[in-house]
Image: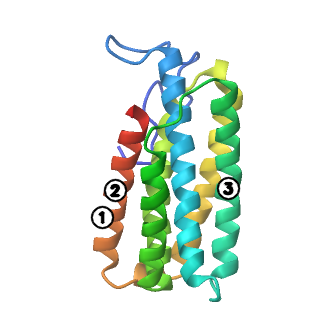
Amino acid sequence: MSETEPSGAGAGGPKETAEDRLPGDLGREELLARILRVDHAGEYGAKRIYEGQLAVLGGSDKAPLLQHMADQELHHLETFARLIGERRVRPTALLPVWHVAGYLLGAGTALLGERAAMACTVAVEEVIDGHYAGQNAKLGEDEAELKALIERFRAEEVEHRDLGIDHDAEMAPAYRLLYEVIKTGTRAAIWLSERV
């Protein structure tokens, strides 16, 4: 199964959130809390990545593109911040880590050049595409609004990935290595943020 294929009860997901759970799976409220916690953390990290990239590349011809993506990530973050407040979900305890790590990843890749910054976007957004698809497969009709929101944000993340490819991400020095390292780090950040 590819990263972008949803898992669960078919492409439409379960009729009700967590209704098809197996023994040991998260219950409905735990699942929803985990989804909101990790998505809030991920959008916070994305905001910090773009802040780091803009700090280095703010005067380049890529600045408007980076600002466009940063603005969308900020909207995603504000939305998930509102939702975790409304639903009384504890944010991840790792936000201070993602504050520093996100900025360093953004600034570090930008220091390697515009193409490396785009490679970072491609790697992160590819993981997020699959992550959001997996979440949507777990959400049922009782969470139609959250499902639609995640799907809309997923489409914007895919747009970011495609923009990165269009702006020569794959021509970055050591692209494959950079891409794989960032994807691995992103998956680890997701796993940790869901749980901590």
Q: CA distance from mark 3 to mark 2?
A: 21 Å
Residue at image coords 32%, 10%: 23
Instruction: For label 1, count other residues whose C-alpha is less than 10 Å away and answer few (under 14), some (14-19) or many (20+).
Output: few
Q: On the image, numbered disc 3 is attached to which residue?
A: 74
Q: Dividing the picture into quarters, in which one does residue 47 lie?
A: bottom right
Q: On the image, numbered disc 2 is attached to which residue?
A: 185
Q: Is residue 78 above or below residue 126?
A: above
Instruction: Name the spot of residue 170 as percent of width and height, x first.
Output: 42, 78
- Please give the label number shown on residue 181: 1
Local SS, label 2: helix
The three-letter amino acid code for the residue at tag 2 is Gly
The three-letter amino acid code for the residue at tag 1 is Val
Whether residues under marks 1 and 3 lie with C-beta atoms below 8 angstroms apart, the answer is no
The answer, for residue 149, to whether it is visible in the render is no
Whether residues under marks 2 and 1 lie with C-beta atoms below 8 angstroms apart, the answer is yes
Select label 1 or label 3 by which is in front: 3
